[in-house]
């Protein structure tokens, strides 16, 4: 910006341009997709950085994470169903035992009345 500024009273000389110098590289902005020849670290169109663009996780990584999540959810659901089923069987067995005990007690009582 101040390349051609000389101290007060001194002559200004034009900046020397090296003709063998390569032109700036063409860069494509990941945000706005504008192509520009620049050596800067920021897009001249939108101002976003060329260097620190956020990368989205790859499709493969997202697929693997989704499958893993589904497997874990399926395992948790399976365990919950198994525990619920086991508890209902235990309750049914307890009710059946109680009913059998009551029936046996009633039968003994009926036999005792007969004698």
Image: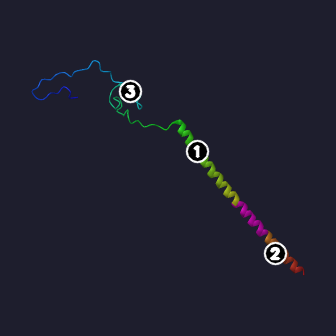
Q: Residue at x 57, y 42 (%)?
A: 66
| Residue at the top extreme, as displayed | 19
Q: Is residue 89 magenta?
A: yes
Closer-to-camera residue (62/103):
62
Give how far apart the Cα atoms at labels 2 and 3 are. Answer: 92 Å
Give how far apart the Cα atoms at labels 2 and 1 are. Answer: 55 Å
| Residue at the left extreme, as displayed | 9
Give how far apart the Cα atoms at labels 1 and 3 are. Answer: 38 Å
Q: Is residue 105 magenta?
A: no
Q: Quadrant of residue 49?
A: top left
Q: Which residue is mark 3?
A: 27
Disc 2 vs disc 3: Cβ atoms closer than 8 Å?
Answer: no
| Residue at the right extreme, as displayed | 115
Q: Residue at x 26, y 20 (%)?
A: 18
Secondary structure found at label 3: strand
Secondary structure found at label 1: helix
Q: What number is the disc on residue 68?
A: 1
Q: Position of residue 6 (x, y in %)?
A: 15, 27
Q: Residue at x 41, y 28 (%)?
A: 33
- Up the image or down, 70 lies above or below 33; here it is below
Closer-to-camera residue (34/52):
52
Q: Earlier in the sequence, mark 1 or mark 3?
A: 3
Q: Residues within 10 Å of mark 2 (few under 14, many from 20)?
A: few
Q: Quadrant of residue 65?
A: top right
Q: Which residue is mark 2?
A: 105
Viewer-nearest of labels 2 and 3?
A: 3
Q: Quadrant of residue 86?
A: bottom right
Q: What number is the disc on residue 3?
A: none
């Amino acid at each position: 910006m101040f390349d051609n500024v000389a101290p007060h009273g001194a002559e200004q000389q034009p900046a020397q341009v090296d003709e063998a110098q390569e032109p700036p590289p063409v860069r494509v902005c990941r945000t706005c997709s504008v192509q520009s020849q620049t050596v800067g670290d920021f897009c001249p169109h939108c101002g976003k950085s060329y260097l620190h663009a956020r990368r989205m996780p790859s499709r493969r990584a997202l697929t693997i994470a989704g499958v893993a999540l589904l497997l874990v959810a399926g395992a948790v659901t399976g365990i919950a169903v198994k525990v619920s089923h086991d508890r209902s069987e235990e309750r049914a067995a307890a009710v059946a035992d109680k009913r059998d005990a009551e029936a046996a007690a009633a039968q003994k009582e009926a036999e005792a009345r007969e004698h």
